[in-house]
Amino acid sequence: MRWPVTLPAKGRSFPIALASFIVLQAVAALFFVADVTADLWTTALGAHSVLEALVTSVLLIGIVLSVAQLRWTLREMEMQGRALEVASGDFVRFIERQFDSWSLTDAERDVGFLALKGCDIREIAELRGRAAGTIRAQLASIYSKANVAGHPQFVSYFVEELLSRASERSQDQREDQPKAAAS
Amino acid sequence: MIDLSEKQDAQGGAKIAPPDPWDPLVRVTHWVIAGAVLWNGLISKPGGTVHVWIGWIALVVLALRVLWGFVGPREARFASFLPDPRRAVAHLLSLLRGRVREHPSHNPAGAIMVYALWLSLALVIATGLQMTEWKNPVTISEEKAAVAAGDWSVLVNNATESDEHSEDMSLSRLIKQVHELAANLMLVLAVVHVAGVVVESMALKRNLVRPMIRGRS
Amino acid sequence: MSKKLLLALTLTVAPISAFAMPVVGDVVGTNPTDATAALAEKGCAVHDFEAEGGKIEAKCKDEAGKEWEVYIDPKSGAVAEIKDND
């Protein structure tokens, strides 16, 4: 599980506060449980003991509910984080698969990835330690293999894919909610 | 060649590693127990009021962690790091070679350490409870106050069924020895644990303490 | 019981002390005043009482100035254990 980086600071401190509070509740509950057990052990069942036992049960139920709430909160955060991760990880895998299917060379894969990230020819040349002419030639080869006219079309090929996946995913998430809650 | 696989593992998700940071209950229980063991093992007077208070808090926190080991998030559950001595030894051997693989939760050697620590703690707590006749810290501090004021009858009033066993000093001596032995064992294990975390951090080239505190911000 | 056996038994239940000391089984009393007096008479000067493990822990010094912990059963007033304080 990762804390989603987009979550505000308040979103992260709540689970910690809840976890700490659960510990406090549990310490308090222990004393009540010990007290009630000792009472029931030594003295007969009186109204006082019964009342204490009821209060202690309420305290214990409170802890169970807090633990359940913490669990639920963590799961929600995990799902959000995973959605983000999967979105980016999945996309990278898609790009790799496409580059594979176009039989790009190793150098062309690197250049193509940098071009998708938005680097211009000069920047790519600097990063790769090659001449601008070499990069231009490599990009031309990529566009030819990908069967696209030029840089804008190359980029839009992948943007279209990302957009269609985004709409698919929000569909899946809505379907996944009940499944996730049941697991 | 830019390594795009950094973002992927067999499932196509993120790299395998324990959560960063660990969930808040794991973190809170870890440091409370660590603090309790150190304070009671090294600082507080054995049998004193503070010592008993901390022992009871450790009992509760350990119970919480055990509960969480069944209902918590996946990496926090015992099922994610079951004890496996064979794999633990294999892990230690690969540590010696300086290369270890990642695990989604505690690594096999770390898992053995965790179980050893929890079992020792349970033993310390059980013997401690027996030595204080299962009285809670509030009762104990009341008794101490009464005796300090000169009233011994409070002990007689609070005595449980231990009267028949009051002559059996050899059993209570044994319990005391087990308590001290287990407590000292925990302190030794704690040192080994810290060393293990350092060595593992070096092998993985990652600060393993940080996920147990706040993780990456 | 022969004197030798009795002596051996006494030595096994009480820690070794060069000076007179109370022994396990001695009844010293169920309140601080009685216990202090009885223990002093047996050779150990009490300076503090504490509750521990359901018993009374009497901290006292013998004639050599050595510290001892004498555990007293609060119900019977008998010495249950004597420990070296080291």
Image (tube, grey):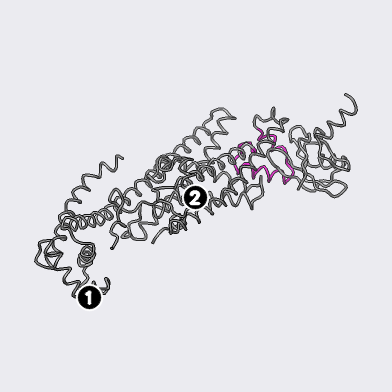
Q: Nearer the viewer, residue B137 or B196?
A: B196
Circle 2 sits in a helix, a strand or a loop, which is it?
A: helix
Image quadrant assignment for residue A182: top left
Q: Which amino acid does label 1 sit on?
A: Ala
Instruction: Please report, as a chain letter, where disc 1 is located.
Output: A
Q: What stretch is highlighted in magenta?
A: B131-159
Find the distance from the CA under tag 1 to the CA under tag 2: 55 Å
Q: Image height check: is A175 above or below B130?
A: below
The residue identified by callout 2 is: B30
Does the magenta-highlighted stretch encompass residue B133? yes
The crowding category of the residue bearing disc 2, from other C-alpha atoms within 10 Å (few below 14, some 14 to 19, many at least 20), is some
| Viewer-nearest of discs 1 and 2 | 1
Instruction: Please report, as a chain letter, where disc 2 is located.
Output: B
Does the magenta-highlighted stretch encompass residue A68? no
Q: Which amino acid does label 2 sit on?
A: His
The residue identified by callout 1 is: A131
Image quadrant assignment for residue B208: bottom left
Q: Position of residue C6 (x, y in %)?
A: 87, 29
Q: Is residue A60 left or right of residue A128?
A: right
Q: Are marks 1 and 2 on the same chain?
A: no
Count of numbered marks: 2
Q: Where is residue C14 in the image (x, y as percent from the top left)?
A: 81, 37
Image quadrant assignment for residue C50: top right
